[in-house]
Amino acid sequence: MKFESIEHIKEEFELNGVDKNDIKSELKKKLAEAHPDKVGEENFDGEYFEKIKSGLEFFSNSTSTDLVTTEQVTDLIKIVKDLTASNSNNVAEKQFADSLNEYYKEKREALLLPKISLSVVTGLLSFLWLFPQTVEDHPVLSKYIRFENSTSTLIWALILVYTLMFWMLISMKETREKNLSKRLKTERTQNKILNDFNKENGNLVFSKSDLTDFILEEYGARRQQPIWIAFMGRAGIDQESAESLANHLIGKAERKGLIKEIKESRTLDESYKWE
């Protein structure tokens, strides 16, 4: 009898060993017990004896890679899958974090010019108000700015108040956005997004776009706002950040067995169903 694998040998002789040396030892023991000197000529089973010898020859003729058990191969595949899934999760999480950070960076840069402009204008007017003689001695400024005139003083006061309010509201908005960014990266908030989406979705089939739209509805920034009033809006994320978050959440849900991708989808957008 010719054996093709170590599993075949273990099954044939009902062996319990895992290591190849243990299995060989068990076979040698069986070979000794089946030897004619042990059992006698009348009880000797030549076919069974040769079968055991064939099992031992398998070890002699096989390479080390042939002796890897099915359980070991299965465990190895599981480990590789877990490592691949973990790596994919880390990549998706990093893409979301990078997208979010880039979005808020662009927003801060867009407000940099108004910040500087208002600060410079307010600073100049404040200087001139504190030193009115500078205005009176200047041939051009003296024609347009007269602080003894209540109108000039009122304009300066309004600009000063607006600048202070602008800086204060911008600071508050940036703080809200920073807090939102931190919350969206937490496990608790991400679980809440999935649970809320599941309730709204009604355990039906959904696409990645559906989840993205839900995230934008709950956490998206308002669209088409003039830059001068943008700082008064709610803190939110953009389309790209929402898509990155949706990818990250879908990957986590798939690994936990909460959802499953529908391979037969007829659209370019990936579709999933709740398990």
Image: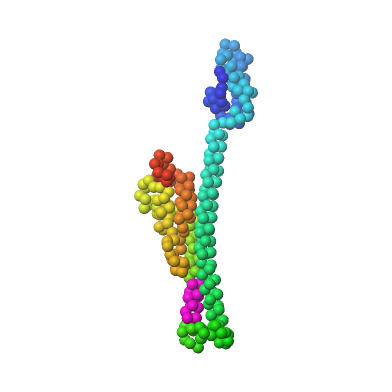
Identify which residue, 34 or 170, lies in the foreground: 170
Please name the residue shown 49% across and 69% down the image: 170
Image quarter where the N terminus lies is top right
Name the image quarter holding the C terminus: top left
Asked whether, in this view, residue 144 is left or right of residue 196, the answer is: right
Q: Main secondary structure of the magenta part?
A: helix
Which image quadrant is residue 135 in? bottom right
Say if the magenta span includes residue 165: yes
Residue shown at 41% from the left, 54% from the top = 213
Q: How many marks?
A: 0
| Residue 22 in view of the camera | no
Is 151 displayed left or right of 137 in the figure? Answer: left
Of the pair 70 and 210, the residue shown nearer to us: 210
Q: Position of residue 150 (x, y in %)?
A: 47, 86
The color scheme shown is rainbow
Provide residue 75's location: percent of width, then percent of height: 55, 37
Residue range of the region highlighted in magenta in the rendering: 155-168
Position of 165 relative to 142 (above/below): above
> Which of the two residues, 166 or 136, is positioned nearer the viewer here?
136
The residue most toward the bottom is 148
Whether residue 207 is visible here, answered yes or no, is yes
Estimate the x, y position of residue 265 in percent, counting from the top left. Answer: 40, 41
Q: Position of residue 152 (x, y in %)?
A: 48, 83
Q: Going by the picture, which residue comes out furthest to the top?
A: 42
Please tell me which residue is depicted at 48% across the width and 74% down the height of the picture.
Answer: 165
Q: Is residue 161 magenta?
A: yes
Left or right, 248 with respect to 51, comes to left
Look at 48% across and 52% down and name the residue there.
244
Using the image, determine if residue 207 lies above or below residue 12. Answer: below
